[in-house]
Amino acid sequence: MWELFVRSLDASIVLAIAALGELIGQRSGVLNVGIEGVMLFGATFGFIVAQTTGDYTTGFIAAIAIGAIIGLMHGVFSITLGVDQVVSGMGIWILGFGLTTYIGNPYTGPLGMARIDRIGGLSPFFYLALALIFLTWFVLNKTSLGLKIRSVGENPEVAEVSGVSVNRIRYLCVIVSGMLMGLAGGVYGLSYNPVWNYNFLMGWGFIALALVFFSMWNPFIMFGGAVLFGALWQLALSPEFILPGVMSRYLWRMVPFVITIVVLVLMSTRWFRTHWGAAKPEALGVPYKKEG
């Protein structure tokens, strides 16, 4: 049972860090549905660099760096050029799926390095995730920078008039967002499941996207949701630990995605918009062009 708990936390860490990156971007008004693509880039480049150099730190730096580059690219399309953010995000996902399959194919197989040491029986990234979640909450709610981020996500016109550079804040957020998504991919490929294969994330980026909406853009609720989905995913892999013989493991693997679909459908209902719509950044997904 302890092993199931630990593996569930390991899965939740990946989801939490990726969703945290998306949350930061969305609070500034920029939507990125291509989380899966950014994570694939981070996981693949991190895996290749770590295996080539034999150093985990270099691998994680590579994962974060490629995430920052993809985040910047999304910013150029969605902020500067005003491209539809959903289209830009889907392009990142498709590019990530295709390019990482080509680049990573020669490295198919296990990482071949000693596993990262645990601290108190838990992954060191669990403590990092907790620190990042608290730091994000603090910055967004207790600092002037957080006020600027929230203001450009709610009403960029008013923020600009108040002296806030909307584009500068949004670029900062999408780059940080990409870095966290790349890190999440690196954690997946170097710690949680250090065996490279094409599309080995299996839709986790879309679960992370749903977690942001599920959380009402609150980092702490988001982490709770990540733990829930992490447990569901691990249960899907090893259902015999809790409910032996109840259902095929392949059906269990559908459960997290079914819940994701239900959450997203619920978000689109009038009831949800009436009761919880105020939590959504008002300018989310809306390009901003400075007048004059």
Image (cartoon, rainbow, N blue to C red):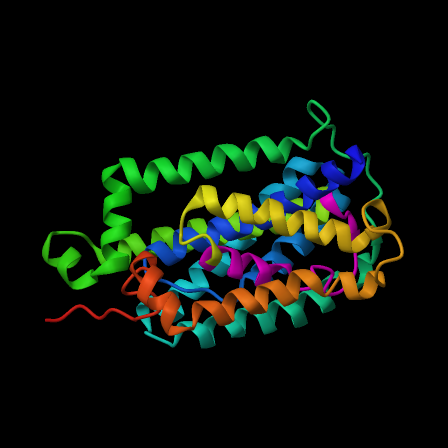
Q: Is residue 144 left or right of 68 when viewed as pictured?
A: left
Question: What residue lies at 52% left-to-right and 73% top-to-bottom?
Answer: 90
Residue extent of the magenta highlight: 192-213
Give me the residue at 86% from left, 49% from top: 240
* Residue 34 % position (x, y): 53, 66
The spot of residue 72 in percent (x, y) is: 43, 59
Asked if the stretch drawn in magenta spans residue 204, the answer is yes
Q: Name the residue: 37% across, 62% down.
A: 30
* Circle count: 0
Q: From the image, which quarter does the C terminus lie in?
A: bottom left
Quadrant in which the N terminus appears: top right
**Is 198 situated left or right of 110 in this image?**
left
Residue 107, located in which quarter of the rendered image?
bottom right
Residue nearer the viewer, 268 or 197: 268
Which residue is outermost to the right? 245
The answer to whether residue 96 of the structure is visible from this angle is: yes
- Residue 2 % position (x, y): 78, 33
51 lies left or right of 271: right
Residue lying farthest to the top in this orientation: 120
Picture layout, residue 177 above or below residue 35:
above
Q: Is residue 195 above or below residue 30?
A: above
Asked if residue 63 shows in the view, the reply is no
- Residue 93: percent from left, percent from top: 57, 69
Residue 45 drawn in magenta: no
